[in-house]
Amino acid sequence: MDRHVRPYDSAVAQSDDVVVTVIDHRNNNNDEVGAVSLRSARFHDLNRLIQSPPTLDNKVAGKWQNLLLAYKTLGVVFGGLVTSPLYVYPSMQLKSPTEENYLGIFSIIFWTLSLIGVVKYASIAVRADDQGEGGTFALYSLLCRNINISILSSKHSCTKSSTAEKPSKLGKFFEASLVARRVLLFIAILGMCMLIGDGVLTPAISVLSAMDGIRAPFPSFSKTWVEVLSAVVLIVLFLLQKYGTSRVSFLFSPIMGAWTLTTPLVGIYSIIKHYPSIYKAISPHYIFSFFWRNGKEGWLLLSGTILCITGSEAMFADLGHFNKSSIQIAFLFTIYPSLVLTYAGQTAYLIRNPYDHQDGFYKFIPSPVYWPMFVIATLAAIVASQSLISATFSIIKQSVALDYFPRVKIVHTSSRQEGEVYSPEVNYILMVICVAVILIFGDGQDIGNAFGVVVTMVMLITTIMLTLVMIIIWRTPPVLVALYFVIFFVMEGVYVSSVFTKIPEGGWIPFAISVMLAFIMFGWFYGRQRKIEYELTHKIDVDSLKALLSDPGIQRVPGLCFFYTKIQDGLTPVLGHYMKNMKSLHNVTVFTTLRYLLVPKVPAHERIIVNKLGLKGVYGCVIQYGYADSLSLEGDDFVLQVTNSLQNHVRDSSDCAQSTTSLDEEIDDIKEAKLAGVVHVRGKTRFHIGKSCSWFDRTMLAFYEVLHSNCRSSLPAMGIPLPHCIEVGMHYEV
């Protein structure tokens, strides 16, 4: 697998004397706070410190590993894309299909797969990873770490890397314009929400299209019964989510491998039997003649042809689970040729049977292999559905971790696979929506219209974000940027314009779901950031805390207190409110910040960072997580890890002036406080919206308060018992 060099690790090797320098960054500004140099006289003594130079055996092993990963991607990454032949032709409203029309449609499908699949995603997008992670949010994260595009004022933003180059003109524009930063954030969030919409529609359209094959051998089996049977299959699939997919995931790749292999074989048979010269349609000439003959009707048919590229975003979004090479190998050598051959075979059959497009997949299956193909198609549709459902859980988990989504319950269903998560609330909402889509909009064309909106919007948003990455981060030559943007923006823009005409015919479903989710995420994130802004403005520093403790009315009471704060440079204003009313502070108080960084993962040795705050029994603690990490600290385990870190820090930070007796006393105080009882205190803050607020703040903060009142507490999410939690109410005046 590709090794991604992180900004906080560096290794320098010189001749036989090797210096390994480990640089540790402790905040989002990536300030260097420490470096440890380790020396050795010989290279063979460093095997445990640095990786050995690649040998021929290592290269061979790496190639086999990439091939194994490529095989595994079939069941995870490409489920939605490779099953698209089930519903592309049935989604088209062809009135009077002719040979020329089918040749034009196949030419459009071929060039869409080639340009968007091969060029955009497999060649360009996979290179825009954020330390190994992909997807729309990874692009936004990448921009955040290189330019200051926080929606807060720049003085409070700390996302920009100290090693970043001087911002480009476009980067300066985003840094200067609050409106532009808000729009960019909303676009990134909308892209994530469209992927969640994909998780709603892929199970519906895949299972419904696969189950529809039962009607060919049994004409008396009505479409209503197909819809009911599909709904039952989906309900069972969603009810099994809580058990995780580890036990059956080993079947995913064989099933999708069988599908990927058998469909092109049927396609080749169909080409030879019905229309051997089908590949002349590869010439773009057939695209121009198609639009010349059909005009507006041909433009409207694009809402169906776009479905051939459904699931291509997964090549980029699932980058963190595999690597660039494995995804490229799987797509270029299996998925892409399989799709081209399958669509060519379908088109060859339809040229000779032009009015069979409503059942465009099953009609071109030869009768001797019909039932095996039906079984494989049904299993492939279920696997594709499972992949999108799992991806939706992962997106929600990452969004919750980064405070972009109201807190919901996240359960890890596997002790070995960290990314295998399940959310009960999200699962049942998805189930209800999927079943409703099938039963209300059972017509494959209506669901196809809805699916087209998701596909085109995600592609267009990715194109826009990639263009910004090219200009601001990669500093790509303007000619190449213009060439990329013009080709894909125009191409996808034409698709979007066609798909949007179908909004009244079912296309409004995912659009409404995605926009609603985007507003929820934007409103939640905006409210959380405004709270942080208030706390940074009204924070309590160490001198202020010392003044509060000097008040004779303030008592130090026995016990260990974890006081949660959203800021690290200072203490939350809730502390002053608490001390003035409770007239006390625990003997050992640890001001704890849960910090989710805009990186995929944080190394284990940097998870918990503790320090003294200059007052007796008062410490600071930062718990860092990336958006692909799991919050695995729970209850007593959390307390144990923090107290151990505190004791180690006290020992390591002792100096000559501090006696061994006082050092032991400080460690004993921590142990005694833990035995006396542990309490977790957090602020339950609300906004007091004054008359001077702008309409934007008034609307968004009121919306945030509604969300905040109906979401889960962050402390139970860490496994902390409720009897040990105290909430301190306070109003923040805007």
Image (cartoon, helix red, strand yellow):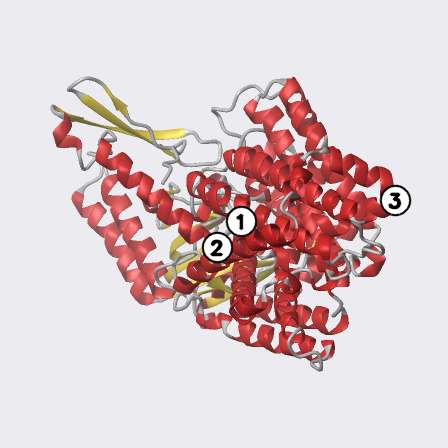
Query: Helix or strand or loop: what does disc 1 sit on?
Result: helix
Q: Position of residue 339 (x, y in %)?
A: 57, 49
Q: Is residue 268 visible?
A: yes
Q: Is residue 622 visible?
A: no
Query: Type of residue at label 3?
Result: Lys
Q: Which residue is mark 3?
A: 296
**Residue found 68% across the figure and 34% down from its top:** 283
Query: Helix or strand or loop: what does disc 3 sit on?
Result: helix
Query: Type of residue at label 2?
Result: Leu
Circles 2, 3 touching at the beta carbon (< 8 Å): no
Label 1 Cα crowd, 10 Å radius (few <14 / some 14-19 / many 20+): many
Q: Which residue is mark 2?
A: 261
The CA span between labels 1 and 3 is 31 Å
Q: Position of residue 58 (x, y in %)?
A: 25, 36
Q: Position of residue 488 (x, y in %)?
A: 69, 34
Sequence order check, earlier mark of 1 and 2: 2
Circles 1, 2 touching at the beta carbon (< 8 Å): yes
The correct choice, above or below, for 500 with respect to 146 in the image is below
Q: Position of residue 137 (x, y in %)?
A: 58, 44
Pick the front one: 2 or 38: 2
Left/right placement of residue 320 relative to residue 689 reads left
Pick the front one: 200 or 163: 200
